[in-house]
Amino acid sequence: MKRIDLTTMTELTTRQAATLLNVSVRSVQLWVERGALQAWKTAGGHRRISVESVQQLLDEKREKQTPLHNTQRKNSKVVLIVDEDQDTLLLYQMLINSWFPSLQIKTATNGIDALVKIGEFKPTVLITDLHMPQLEGYAIIERLENDPQYDHLTPIVVTALGEAEVTTNHLPKNVPVLHKPIPVDQLKELVMQAIKK
């Protein structure tokens, strides 16, 4: 594959950005829609991505991988994100990392894995979908609600289900429910409130 030289370019195609960031084209499209990447459309309707914003994400990825950075985050608060869709998890990670760089982010793709990671990492915030393999978000929240050792944990539901489809009687009244596509400003505010507690 031909190497992309960022020093000679100001814009990238969606596919080029995906190649550089080592993610799917869909992930790039999601990040553009959510404002994590700057982009515009040409007169012909083709999407172009800002090289500067791609470079910024690449720098953040490198920073995450350095031992020093990991040491600095060791004692920081943890956010656990649970969603079966990998592209959605990546989007959450990019958003939360850009809002709150000091937070440690963990992910799970199903309810059983989520419970294991809750026990292991003691997160401050849980962002979860409702319908997932093995154990649904409803069941995760119910188990946490009935265990006093997780009183410090703030659950936030983000679901593709419509308001009428969410079985609210299966959720504690104080659990906020957001509906996809992810309402970015509301999610940011809820996470901020949770980590300030």
Image: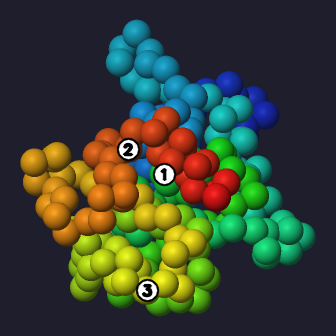
Q: What residue sits right under mark 3 in the picture?
A: 147
Q: Dot 3: within a 10 Å radius of its alpha carbon, few (fewer than 14), some, or many (20 or more) residues?
A: few
Q: Which amino acid type corresponds to the residue marked 2 in the rendered image?
A: Ile
Split into 4 quadrants, where in the image is the N terminus?
bottom right
Colour scheme used in the picture?
rainbow
Could you say where residue 102 lies in the image, as x and y percent from the top left? 75, 58
Is residue 65 in sight in this rendering?
Answer: no
Could you say where residue 43 lies in the image, as x and y percent from the top left? 40, 10
Q: What residue sits right under mark 1 in the picture?
A: 91
- Mark 1 vs mark 2, foreground winner is 2
Q: Residue at x 41, y 58 (%)?
A: 156
Q: Is residue 164 left or right of residue 115?
A: left
Instruction: Report the disc number at residue 123.
Output: none
Q: Dot 1: within a 10 Å radius of its alpha carbon, few (fewer than 14), some, or many (20 or more) residues?
A: some
Sequence-first tag of 3 and 2: 3
Secondary structure of the residue carrying tag 1 is: helix
Q: What residue sits right under mark 2 in the picture?
A: 182
Secondary structure of the residue carrying tag 3 is: loop
Q: Dot 2: within a 10 Å radius of its alpha carbon, few (fewer than 14), some, or many (20 or more) residues?
A: some
Split into 4 quadrants, where in the image is the C terminus?
bottom right
Most distant residue in the right direction: 68
Could you say where residue 78 lies in the image, as x and y percent from the top left? 63, 69
Cα distance, mark 3 to mark 1? 30 Å
Q: Residue at x 30, y 65 (%)?
A: 172
Could you say where residue 72 lies in the image, as x and y percent from the top left? 86, 68
Residue 138 or residue 181, whichever sits in front: 138
Sequence-first tag of 1 and 2: 1
Q: Which amino acid type corresponds to the residue marked 1 in the rendered image?
A: Leu
